[in-house]
Amino acid sequence: MRHGVLLHRDNAPAHTSAVAVATIRECSFQLLDHPLYSPDMAQTDYCVVSLKDSVHGRNFYSEEVIYAVNDWFEQQDKKFFMDGVISLAHR
């Protein structure tokens, strides 16, 4: 898995910390940075926006949120994820 891995990250402090950067280098991942103040959404934002809409207004206790998120991903069909990938090319 260490060979040929492209890692896309945004510039969040957790992603740019010394520990994270050292781990990325140690794994020999090729890093694809997200530009500062980019008006584009990150790849994961496509899913996150839709996921947030599905859980909006709900209250979760303990591990219930984990099950809700896993259920949401399982309910999505392949087209949902393909549309997200295709939309990246049009930004």
Image: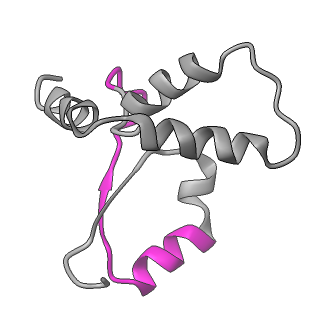
| Quadrant of the image containing the N terminus | bottom left
- Give whichever of 6, 39 is nearer the camera: 6
Query: Picture coordinates of residue 55 (x, y %)?
Result: 64, 22
Is 70 located above or below residue 88 in the figure?
below
Q: Residue at x 12, y 23 (%)?
A: 90
- Give whichever of 11, 57 is nearer the camera: 57
Q: Residue at x 62, y 50 (%)?
A: 13
Query: Picture coordinates of residue 12 (x, y %)?
Result: 56, 45
Residue that protrudes farthest toward the right in the picture: 61
Residue 86 in which image quadrant: top left
Q: Which residues are magenta?
A: 19-40
Q: Is residue 38 left or right of residue 82?
A: right
Query: Picture coordinates of residue 52 (x, y %)?
Result: 57, 23
As for residue 38 lying within the magenta part, the answer is yes
Q: Residue at x 11, y 31 (%)?
A: 89
Query: Picture coordinates of residue 42 (x, y %)?
Result: 37, 35
Q: Residue at x 55, y 41 (%)?
A: 71
- Give whichever of 79, 43 is nearer the camera: 79
As for residue 51 lying within the magenta part, the answer is no
Q: Is residue 23 left or right of residue 81?
A: right
Residue 45 in which image quadrant: top left
Q: Is residue 46 left or right of residue 23?
A: left
| Quadrant of the image containing the C terminus | top left
Q: Is residue 16 left or right of residue 39?
A: right
